[in-house]
Amino acid sequence: MSNKKMENEIIIVKEVTKSYNGFTALNSVSFTVKSGEVYVVLGPNGAGKSTLFNIIAGVMKPSSGSVKVLGDAPSNPSTRLKISYLPPTPPLYPWLTVMENIDFYSSLYGLSRNDARKEAMELLEILGIKDLSNKLASKLSTGQGKLASIVLALVVRPELLILDEPTTGLDPGMRRNIINLLRKQASNKTTILMATHLIDEAEELANRVAIMDKGRIIAEGGVEELKKLYAPPAVLVIKPSEENVKKASDVLKRHWSNIYSSNDEVRLHTENPDEDMPKAVLMLSENGIRILSVSVDKPTLEDVFLKLTGRRLTE
Amino acid sequence: MRLKAIASFIIRDLKLIVRDKSLVFWLIAWPLIWIFMTAYIFVPPATGEGTVTIKLGVVNMDNSQVSFNGSLLITIMKEVKYNGSNLFNIKLYSSEEEALQALRKGELDAVIIVPDGFGYNATNIMRETRLIAYIGSRTPQSAQITSSIITNFFNGFSKELSLKRMDTLQKIIEQLPISEEGKQWFNISIRGIMRPLNMTFEKVYPEAFETRARILGWYTIGAVGMMFLYSGFNSGASLIVSEKERGTLKKLFSTPLTEGEFLTGGFLSQLTMLLISALILIIVGTSPVIGASIAFNPFNPAHLLAIIFIVCGALMSMSIGSLISLISKTWSSASNLATVLGLLLSFTTGVWFPIEWMPQPIRVLAIIFPPAWSIEASRRILVFETVMETLILDAIKIFSSTILLLTVALISYRTMIRRYSEY
């Protein structure tokens, strides 16, 4: 590997396996993240995303394999100076105000209080929570805590930002604010490694996506590349009445193999939606299944995950 | 090691003192409650001035028609005063059975039976005089106090009776037809027979306990020790598990913070809180509200050594707390175990209650428990005003055990960090 290529690779994960108490949380995971990329790890809860992020952030050691971040071991303090990791739970001290929490963490990075506060105020303003700066963390709602934590992570101006489920539990407005802020960070050449189980978030932000399931990366690539490789040209989304979802799925499976059902819908992966839609509607009507809505959608990463695992991401 | 990172832990946790009410309670209010209780209940302002009055039932069976008899004894007992108060509150009973029934019911502290012939025997120099006393035992302490007062009174009474008898004998000897040397020999011999041991008792307190203020000084240092034990244990036990459960440990270890900075910062911030609390306790203890007397002169090397001993006490308590964290899976179990253990040890190792109050097997705890050494040594300096030369052995013991326990704490914390980084 040439030196130039190595310099460009901010994260190199090689054959990383993590086992504890007889359980394999990560199984021979390998990937690289390039400088300035937004690399999203998509997977359901329990896929091993957090374990992987803990190892990359240097707070956990792998059972085998190796991780290099910014050309060095992630546990090295000089490497950590350039990394900011945000765990899924807001790491706030409840007896401190938002700004005091920011003071504390930024001092660990050796930042001056004034610089950190100035930067923090700007970030708080962008996220629309400037008025919370003097509020005790214990008085914040879950969403407000998450937003404040994003500021904690960004205030140190990291080269690499590692975010584990940063928008989980947030309302759409808050989520939008965070996505906009992350886009801005990415445009400033900050490399972002983010874990999520939210499809739209991954599709909107990611340059590249790794799909994880049961401790393995089962697919990796650009969003469109993955769709091209694993998803059909179209998806027929049928919403029968709730009690008929399973029956509808069983009826359609008699004719098609790519049928995936969830609590409220049946997804049919199809090459030819114009032909398949009337056929499916007719079959369901003949079997006495009332249909609430039918639509032809473009495939999403959810469909990629369905294709690869046979399960939905949020199951 | 970066001082700024370490200082940020101290600043962070100092804010906790003003914002966390439960912490303020345990660090300051709880030991202050004990100091106040000591100052106003256990060692009240009138200590040494008041007396105990014994509720005494008397059954007088004496019918002696002589100058001194049972009735006169009762009159004397009614009149006896100590520090302006009656020593006995006497109630007469007609029968022994009736008096003992009242004693059993707890209506009396003691019963004295004056047998028939008491007066005759008392006034006859050749007879032995008998009295029977029954002591009530509502509590071991009350029985001890009652017994002691009655014994002292009748010892004094017996002494007076001896002197009267000797005077009477001397008068008889004067009448005998023997030489002066012989009379003198008789007098000395009789005195020796009557009072084989003429012992005088004077209460001499240690200088420190001469005044109530010094007693309160002893307890104020004890309150600091008690607070060190449960709060120090708690701080040590919670140092890592609290960060883990709060969800901050992973964030901390993803920053440039080193393990050494984390442990030093965490330990120093907890130590600062304990020392601030100790200072507040001493200030309140020595204020006019409590009135404790603690000798402190910043130019006296021994007094400065006492401060070092106090710091060692806090460090040792926190280090022991680190061991508690090893056996506790959650923050609340670590905290509960630390508080219970800390309070228990403060009451059994001579930190709060004097070691002399403890049964012999429990005293072993104080002998083997290093934080108690530092509190005891500090007391010897600040309350008993012990000189520097006598503290060398204490200093060696305290410093070496502090270093040893800090090393144990370091190993414990590192083990915990490794354990947490595995999952």
Image: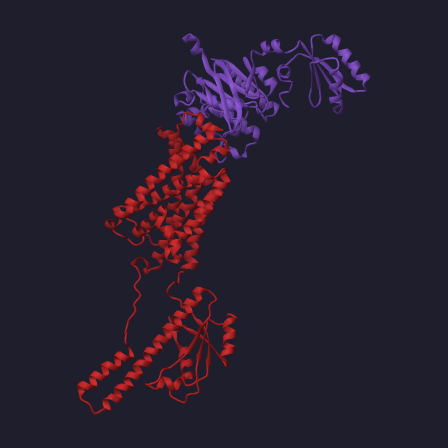
Chain colours: A purple, B red
The part of the image, by quadrant, that contains residue B74 is bottom left
The answer to whether any part of residue B103 appears in the image is yes
Indicate the quadrant containing the N terminus of chain B: top left, top right, bottom left or bottom right. Answer: top left
Q: Is residue A10 above or below residue B72?
A: above
Where's residue B15, x and y in %? 44, 37
Pick the residue in front: B400 or A71.
Answer: B400
The answer to whether any part of residue B10 appears in the image is no
Where's residue B104, x and y in %? 51, 71
Total numbered labels: 0
Pick the residue in front: A66 or B279.
Answer: A66
Where's residue B66, x and y in %? 39, 89
* Side of A175 relative to B103 (left or right): right
Q: Is residue B42 above or below residue A124?
A: below
Where's residue A212, x and y in %? 56, 19
Q: Residue at x 28, y 72 (%)?
A: B199
* Side of A195 relative to B76 (left or right): right
The part of the image, by quadrant, that contains residue B119 is bottom left
- Residue that sits furthest to the front in the current view: A22
The part of the image, by quadrant, that contains residue A48 is top right
Q: Residue at x 37, y 64 (%)?
A: B48
Q: Residue at x 42, y 43 (%)?
A: B233
Q: Is residue B416 above or below residue B142?
A: above
Pick the residue in front: B198 or B302.
Answer: B198
